[in-house]
Image (cartoon, helix red, strand yellow):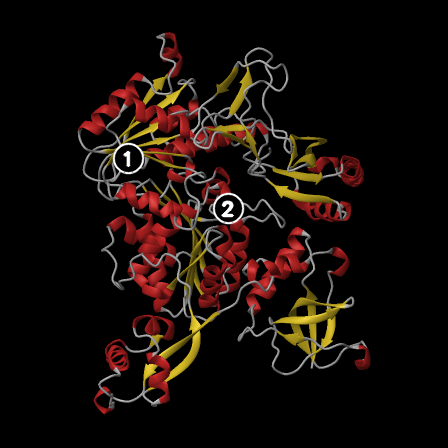
Amino acid sequence: MIAEVIVDIASGETDRIYDYLCDETIAEGSRVRAPFGGKTVAGFVMRLKERSEVPKEKLKKVFSFPDGVPALNGECLSLAGKISARYKVPKALSLRLFLPPEMRSGKVRELMKNYAELKVPLEETEFSKTAVKQAAAAKYLAENGKTECSFLNGMFSGAVSALEKKGYVTVTREQALRDPYKSLAETEAPVGRELTEDQRRAVDSVKGDERTVQLIHGVTGSGKTEIYLTLIAESLKQGKTSIFLVPEISLTPQMLSQLRARFGRNAAILHSGLSAGERFDEWWRLRTGEARIAIGARSAVFAPIENIGVIIIDEEHDSSYFSETAPRYSTFDIALLRARHNGCKLVLGSATPAVDTYKRAQDQEFNLIKLHKCINKKPMPEIVIADMRREARRGNNSNFSVALKEELKKCLDSGNQAILFLNRRGYSPTVICKDCGYVLKCESCDVSLTFHRDEDCLKCHYCGGRYKMPAFCPECGSKKLSYAGTGTQRVELELKSLYPSGRVLRMDNDTTSGKEGHYKILKSFGEKKADILVGTQMIAKGHDFPSVTLVGILDADMSLHFSDYRSGERTFQLITQVAGRSGRAEEKGKVVLQTYSPENDVLRFAVRYDYEGFYANEISLRAATAFPPFSKIVRVLVSGEDEKKTLEALKTLYFGLERLYTESPDKFLFFNKMHAPIKRIQNKFRYQVLMRLCDTSVLPAVYEISASARTRDVLVSVEENPSNLS
């Protein structure tokens, strides 16, 4: 038998099929060890065949990994080929997306443990008076069944081997699954809550509509999650599997607890916050069919399941659904490929859909399902604008307006909880010298350093670099170093000073290290062990805290004035999502929105929760300026540690793309090369070629030219409608 193998080397030079001899135990999708270039490398079997054009005596033999089942199923192999062709990356790179990283490197595999089981009835066992531990161990096994040997020996030292010698127990070696989030509910409850009329209509619309993509546009608190769970339950009844994607890792434990409460061990979680062993075991449970629901962030779209009945993308507008490493895929595009392959529905949900998505629904490419009412039939929280210009004129230079301070006091006095949102971590985002204006910057990146007071150090939020806080300005020697701007740490300290009796929790990247970092903070806040939760965008969506009656948005302008055509859209989405955390139970919620631009149209629409008005205004602006969805922005980013080699690659790339532009100028609205906004990150110089296309037929050629400009030392990557242009 001949195996067609892709070697696991992400290089264009080796990106082709190699023929190898193999035995009959190897199947398509198997991982193999293949002799290659004088060493043994990992590879993937793409296809099996009877004959090869290469003479048999020249073929080498491959040997399979002890995976038990092929690591990749047929759909994964097919999808990897499409990803490789679409994004012009080596096939090995696209195949890697479907495997846990540690599995590829051989650093993790199944965990094997010894288990003891009583093989004779307890009444048929006989023990001497001195064999007290053996008798106790036998009784324990009779009452509890098969038990791990190390656990038994810990309780009854040496009992297992003695019982095995007497023939009373059987010891077997079996795989032990490492279970993330063991503390989450696992009580199976097959029947969910009774659906409201609107929810039932939404479920029926998803099932009855012929279109693949279904967009559920439901206001915050309208019960979208229950619709998702109902669709998953119906998929399971049909013997099918499901994929459920959420934007933030912080949301996965909460959603997993709901899935496990409803579906027991059928739900498996996939995300980068798990340990290597846990991620492997959850992946393995999905691959073997033990678990049939995959839940996780972006990477869970590659879950190794078959016969998919529904794919759900919650908060579909979120920028985290776009990959920032090669291949720079859109999760929606991958999910759509899988939905079409399986003939299933792709369900998108959001209170604030992306403008591009909503236009496709308005054009009837997608089925649009609207949910206008909250489940509890309560009105949306009132949003009060605090004009920070007026606050400054009154001499209030703190981070809290008078209105927010008053509302916080009322909230705490009434025993309720508050959430304060600021999408900037650390104490101060900039340290500046008052005498010479010098700004402390990272040595590896062209960005200012953020001061973290709790660690008394400066940090780069791009490369993770840490620096000691200097006592003097490195430029002029002055002692007048000033902290400019505000981060979540500073807000936390000010709150503790303003409200000494108030208990404050902070949730950002600095406080959520470890797999259960998010879960522990949210659990503590949900149990009312704190009165105020301060956090970045990870607190903005999906969380349901009945006692939260106040939300404060400290700097609504932060994303409003970015030099990005999506800045208004992102601001509207963030405000709406954060505001939706308030008033989710019986008491009415309130939101204080602090801004220096109270007259801005985006904020005007956000205050009224008027998505339709916002969309109409935004889509007319996009049409007038020919920005997406009326065109496509393409950025080709060139980065490398050697600036000369990076510029050479940029030159090669630019000349190739310039020829394309000269040949088809009518397909371009804009074309130019320039420095990236952040010129250097992690010691890599960054340049870019920006294009705005009115005809995407040239896109494959853009990918081809970009791929040919790559070298060993310079990375060239293509992004379509990039979510971050920095």
Q: Quadrant of the C terminus?
A: top right
Q: Nearer the viewer, residue 356 or 41?
A: 41
* Mark 2 surroundings within 10 Å by alpha-carbon count, few (fewer than 14), some (14 through 19), many (20 or more): many
User: Seen in the image, is 174 located left or right of residue 419?
Assistant: right
Q: Is residue 50 above or below residue 607?
A: below
* Mark 1 surroundings within 10 Å by alpha-carbon count, few (fewer than 14), some (14 through 19), many (20 or more): many
- The amino acid type of the residue labelled 1 equals Ser
Q: Secondary structure at mark 1?
A: loop
Instruction: Report which residue position mark 1 lands on.
Output: 582
Residue that appears at 55% across and 51% down: 333
Whole-angstrom CA distance, mark 2 to mark 1, is: 26 Å
Farthest residue, direction front? 130
Image label count:
2
Q: Quadrant of the N terminus?
A: bottom right
Q: Nearer the viewer, residue 500 or 249?
A: 500
Instruction: Report which residue position mark 2 lands on.
Output: 321
- The amino acid type of the residue labelled 2 equals Tyr
User: Seen in the image, is 636 located left or right of residue 550?
Assistant: right
Q: Picture coordinates of residue 616 (x, y %)?
A: 44, 31
Q: Nearer the viewer, residue 150 or 120?
A: 150
Q: Picture coordinates of residue 291 (x, y %)?
A: 41, 66
Residue that appears at 57% across and 58% down: 101
The quadrant in which residue 432 appears is top right
